[in-house]
Amino acid sequence: MTATEFQQISSTIPLSPGIYKYYDAGNTLLYVGKAKSLRKRISSYFSKTFTSYKTHELVQRIARIEFTIVDTEQDAFLLENALIKQFQPRYNIDLKDDKTYPYLVIKKEPFPRVFLTRRKINDGSEYLGPFTSVGKVRELLDFIKLTIPLRTCKLNLSAANIQKGKYKVCLEYHLGNCKGPCEGLQSEEEYREGLLQLRNLMKGNLGPVMQQFKQEMQGYAAALQFEKAEMMRRKLDYLEQYQARSVIVSKHLGNLDVFSILKDGDTAYVNYLMVQHGTIVQTHTIQLETHLDENQEEVLLYAIGQLRASFNSLATEIIVPFELPGWQEETIDEKEFLITVPKGGDKRKLLELSLKNVNYFQDEIRRKKTLHLEGKSEEEKKQVLFQLMEDLQLPELPVHIECFDNSNFQGAFPVSAMVCFKEGVASKKDYRHFNVKTVEGINDFATMKEVVTRRYKRLKDEQSPLPQLVIIDGGKGQLGAAMEAIRELDLTGSMTLVGLAKNEEELFFPGDSESVRLPYNSESLKLIRRIRDEVHRFGITFHRNQRSKGTFKNELEGIPGIGKTTATQLLRKFRSISNIRNQSLEELGQEIGGARAKLVWEYFHKA
């Protein structure tokens, strides 16, 4: 739609607040926006020159405009959020959060069951949450199970079934975890009181529950039932410890939502703290991608709508870092709705905590990006490789890098792993693992020589491309063994080999007495760290899988006259093959007897 075409219809657009929708020629929804004045806002797209190419591209695609009039700008905000969530138009802010969080469901049924679920079904049940800290919820549920007797069975506890005596109490009743509603031993009213306690606990409102526990403890003590009083005291202690681990700002603050934002180009990060009864019960940070140069206020308003809806917030006060025009105090759903920009006090501390979280989240994203080249442009990947070539004085660009690492378990069961990086990115289809075939016992040098020989003999026989750079994780000894394999294969000069010292991040070239240290924060060292961490992960995973499958045969079992039972007995006592090798004949004899000790000792001391 051109500016001239728009002028022909502009007079038909009202000046009222509302939402507008842009469609392309194929009737695809491109963008949903809100406006205090629909005509002024929509006209701005066709009457000014945009600096953003994306905004210009959007205007060029608009073929049809729809709008909906509402009473207030806040109504437009709510409707805009609902439509974006439903249709996810291409040019609207993109919420980068595809995680699903669990809810605690109180099932709609007689004597409701309570359990965690990630599926929210419109079945009339009550859903608490969602919760971002699953571990904390499970910890609280375990406490609830021991404290508030609720049933866990799936029986249909209708009044008719209970009256007929259809069910009998199970083990949970005898353990004290259930009061037996299936046999009519617990009334629905008493069960509902337990559910009320559960709701208070899950919402961070511990005061009423602790008060009830105190009253019960005092009642038991007055009746001289000291064991039950002690049990209630332990429950109180747990709740006090749980409350101490929670972040309590002020018991007088009530329910609040706290938001902070950090915008970096087209990417924005928003942190959300849900405060209930003065305690932070939820914390969550999201990443958003903007498409039309939206300012901080617009992005934050969008995030507030999305996060409050996602976490079912009913707080009537929102704390933000800056003023949102026209949103200082309004009435929504017949409730007073206040937005506050605090200057000091507990609310300011909450805002600073939120800002600290959003900054940490951005730093983590950046750190991960620096350690991973995935997602970078081809030019950025090449730039890192050129830096690595320059730092290591390599004869050619290392577009193909391979890294070897040996792995063993308590001095036994040796294996090796090799990972492959092409164009600076992990090429997982080229990863290889090796079960050591020709080396007896633990010999890192011989093991490295074997696997390097096997790898490059195969590539040579198949006439496959060789890597430009080979990293041997383990230092000078393993590097010398690998070079020996390369010389025997007549591949000297075909590739560059370097040794990476364990933990030191020093690189060694064959024959050099001095190591090479790359700049600590250089992109080339970050890539080498990434490769090293990946070969460790791959090797350890393979080793663990082999052990779980029982693939390895204990070296001790290879000694004539020594069986699996004796080998296991020795490993349980001395922990590793290396320790067994260093024991005296007398020490071995004390564990497995003189005759078998002599067989083991002679095996390790043939010389």
Image (tube, rainbow, N blue to C red):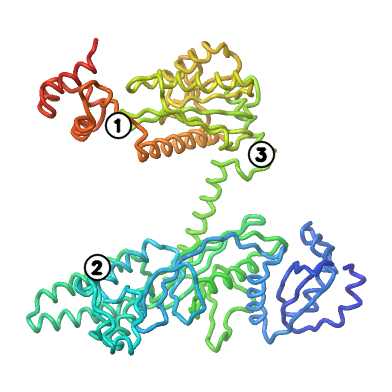
Residue in view at x 57 percent, y 19 percent? 496
Query: Which is closer to the viewer, label 1 or label 2?
Result: 1
Ranked by sequence position, the earlier of labels 2 and 3 is 2
Coordinates of residue 394 in the picture (x, y in percent): 61, 21
- Give the residue number, with chain letter if any, for mark 1: 410
Q: Amino acid at mark 3?
A: Glu
Rendering quarter of residue 179: bottom left
**Residue 380 disc label:** 3
Q: Is residue 11 left or right of residue 429?
A: right
Q: Quadrant of the N terminus?
A: bottom right
Residue 389 drawn at (x, y percent): 62, 26
Could you tell me the amino acid type at mark 1?
A: Gln
Q: Look at the numbered disc 2 and give the secondary structure of its residue.
A: helix
Count of number-bearing discs: 3
Residue at horizontal 59 percent and vertical 22 percent from the top:
459
Distance from the alpha carbon under mark 2 to that under mark 3: 53 Å
Q: Which residue is mark 2?
A: 238
**Closest to the observer, 164 or 92:** 164
Q: Position of residue 566 (x, y in %)?
A: 19, 30
Q: Earlier in the sequence, mark 1 or mark 2?
A: 2
Q: Quadrant of residue 378?
A: top right
- Disc 3 and disc 1: Cα gap in Å? 42 Å
For disc 3, the neighbor class at 10 Å (few under 14, some 14 to 19, many from 20) is few
